[in-house]
Amino acid sequence: MKCERILVEYGAQPYAGLDTYFLDNYEEIDADRKRPVILICPGGGYRMTSDREAEAVAVKYVSMGYHACVLRYSVKPEIFPRALCEVAWCVNYLRSHADEYAIDRNRIFVLGFSAGGHLAASLGAFWQEKWLGELLGVNKEEIRPDGMILCYPVISSKQYGHIESFENLLGKNDTEEMRAYLSLEDHVTEDFPPTFMWHTYEDDAVPVENSLLMAGALRKAGVSLELHIFPHGPHGLSLAKEETRCAATGGGIQKHCQSWPDLTDGWIREMKENDCKEEKKGIIFDLDGVIVSTDKFHYQAWKKIADKMGIEFNEKINERLRGVSRMESLEIILEKYEGAPLSAEQKQALAEEKNGYYVDLLKTMDRCDVSEEVVNTLKSLRRKGYFLAVGSSSKNAKIILRQTRIEDLFDAVSDGNNITRSKPDPEVFLKAAEYIELLPKQCAVVEDARAGIDAAKAAGMMAVGIGTATEYDKCDRKIKSFGELDQIF
Ligand code: BG6
Ligand code: MG
């Protein structure tokens, strides 16, 4: 297990600390296992971070096969939004170091107790806000938590509010407006992550109404929720067992409440199954730049045309051609053309000439031009029961599939020959869904082009970005390598 303290390099020193409990992988078990991670925010009224809600909880999750870490976030006299920025920093850190620690980058859960629950839920409410991404200098997708575990959370600053938490959190900025902004039941949107929440009915420090108000807000926004209200037990139970007993009061043991970590385990497992496996039944793949690296051939072929015509053409301009039809690609290239205007026939001739060069390059392709990773992942997805389709703007898609001998891995092909409008129009993906007889919402798209991500969203499909598309914040999910699809689906 990798246990270390990582400094949360946000704000002025002293930096907050992230204590990790990351499990190792073993050849004898599964060398490539990726685990969800639970990022724990202890409670303490924004005055301290309680030891009772820290290591013991991490160890509990580790024993269930999760990676865990504890964030010792900044508290009074530090004020909002520092702690929130620290937890957002951690989510980004965990996601960007997912490969190094064998973390499943799409299953980063934030767990918070009491005021730590308020902190976690603040990230749930505000992760997509522009100001937060800007403060951290990252894309909002990188700080998106995949789920929330809120344990007897502080939520409201109103009638049922735990006032000390808000006083400590706001310090000199403790105004009515700020309290209203941080009364989280009023800031829940459909972007709030799926949530697991528990509370005790008898809690007299942070009344159960906090969870009830949150539950109502989640329901209204259509956010998935699992809520448990245990009848007995005081505030601050943590694991509710001997391990986290409170030295000062001798209390904190409540047998019936001890089941909550196991309940979260079931919730996380079920979520993964429902998330993609049941809802999504089809996966539509862009071809150029996703399945095969023909993008370099497009470049070489266009370069010949551009050089011949004395037109400036470089990798940067080439990026704009991703996913764009042949004729539209030519128009982009001609933006730099300084000669006399070309007739439609001349343009047609240029596009055909380019295609001739391109098709010649395609002839050099064979099975080796599709990586083992791609082939194995496609096979695995098929074994899991997904229908797989190609959704490409190219009129040469079928030639490529034949040449590389991967036609049999797909159930349908929608390409430049069956559409009238190119990406970002959704037509190519809608046709693909039709061919595999699924509704758009049952399909996900894997794309390397911005135009393709826009097309997927316009089609009402989940958009998974790979390659250059990962710089685009419209992606629902981002993957660094094709094999990660096996974890998402
Ligand atoms: C897309 C490529 O897949 O197909 C574009 O990303 C290309 O760059 C388009 O222009 C059309 O391809 P083709 O093979 O029909 O010229
Ligand atoms: Mg592409």
Image (spheres, helix red, strand yellow):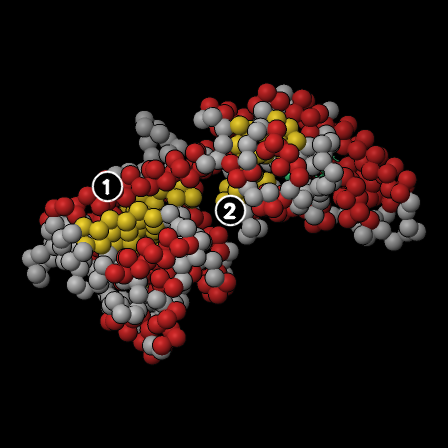
Say if 234 sits above or below 353 in the image: below
Q: Quadrant of residue 263?
A: top left
Q: Quadrant of residue 66?
A: top left
- The residue nearer to you, when weighing 230 against 486, is 230
Residue found 6% across the figure and 57% down from its top = 250
Image position of 489 (left or right of 216): right
- The residue nearer to you, when weighing 3 against 369, is 369
The residue indicated by pointer 1 is 262
Residue 72 position in % (x across, y down): 28, 59
User: Residue 277 — which label?
Assistant: none
Residue found 22% across the figure and 46% down from its top = 260
Say if 72 sits above or below 105 in the image: below
Query: If the picture is divided into quarters, which one holds ligand 2?
Result: top right
Residue found 82% across the figure and 49% down from its top = 334
Residue found 42% across the figure and 61% down from its top = 126
User: Residue 476 — which label?
Assistant: 2
Q: Quadrant of residue 203?
A: bottom left
